[in-house]
Image (cartoon, grey):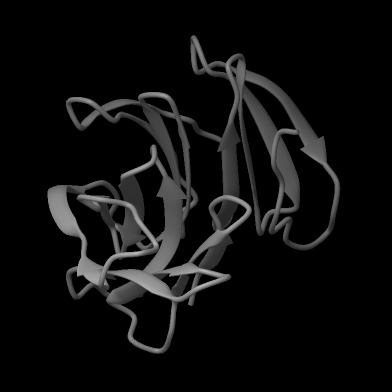
Amino acid sequence: RSMRMLDSRTVVAGFGNPQRMRLLDIHTREIAIIDTHEAQGGCQAIARQDDQRFVIGCGGHICFFRIQEFSSHRDVQRAQEIQNIRAHESVITCLAVRENVIVSGCQDNSVAVWNAINFTKIGNLPGHEDTVRCVDISTASIVASGDDGTIRLYSSETLDLIRVIRVHFKSVRHLEFV
C-alpha cells in the first residue's frame, strides 16, 4: 500500500500484506522485514528517523522500529519494535520526521506533532476539512495538504497557522520541502 525511497539505494514498501513492510536495497536484495500490528486500514505511511530507526503509521498507531545493523551484506533481518503509541482515532495516511519531531496526518482531517524522544504529543494543527494526504517539516515550517484541495503552512516552532493556499478543487496528494 505504501512505498517510499529512503535514499538513493533504499526503498521501503508494502506488498499485499497490510501489516508487513519490506526494506529493500534496489541494487542487491531484501534487507529487512518490518512486521507491524494488525490495524484497520493497514500500514499506509512510513518515514525514516535515522540510519537505523523507522516510523510507520498503522491504522491509528505510530510504531517505532529499529534495524540493529543496517547492512546489505547480512541475511534478511526482522526489525525490532521500540515503541507503539495510539496517535489517532482514524487511519494515519502520512508521516514526516525531522530530527526529534514527527508530524502525522490522518483520515479524520487531523494533523498532529509528536516528540520522537519521549513519544508524547506536542500539539495539533487544525484546519483541514477532509483527509490529510501529505505532511512535511523543515526547520521553520510544517506543511500539510489533503483531499480538501488546500496546502496549509504552519510554524514549526509555535504551531500557528501561517497561510492557507487553495490550489485544487480536488486532492493534493504530494508535497515536500526542497
40 relative to 93, above or below: below
Quadrant assignment for the C terminus: top right
Say if 75 sits above or below 94 in the image: below
Name the residue furthest top: 158
Asked where in the image residue 45 lies, by quadrant, the reply is bottom left
Question: What is the residue that sits farthest to the bottom in this orientation?
Answer: 16
Residue 59 versus residue 118 in the image, above or below: below
Seen at 25% across and 72% down, the residue is 75
Residue 90: x percent and y percent?
34, 60
The x, y position of residue 42, in whole percent, is 33, 74
Give the image location of residue 35, x and y in percent: 22, 71
Q: Give the total of numbered labels.
A: 0
Using the image as rendered, state which of residue 128 and residue 94 is in the foreground: 94
Judged left or right of residue 133, residue 110 is left
- Front residue of 160/24: it is 24
Left or right for 17, reference 142: left
Is residue 35 among what the camera can see? no
Q: Which of 10 and 56 lies nearest the eye of the viewer?
A: 10
The residue under the point 53% across, 52% down is 6
State the image coordinates of residue 172 (x, y, percent, origin top left). 73, 55
* Point 22% across, 68% down: residue: 77
For the residue pair 89 and 83, the one nearer the viewer reads as 83
Decide if residue 87 is in sight here: yes
> Which residue of the protein is positioned furthest toward the front in this rendering?
73
Q: Residue at x 45, y 49 (%)?
A: 47
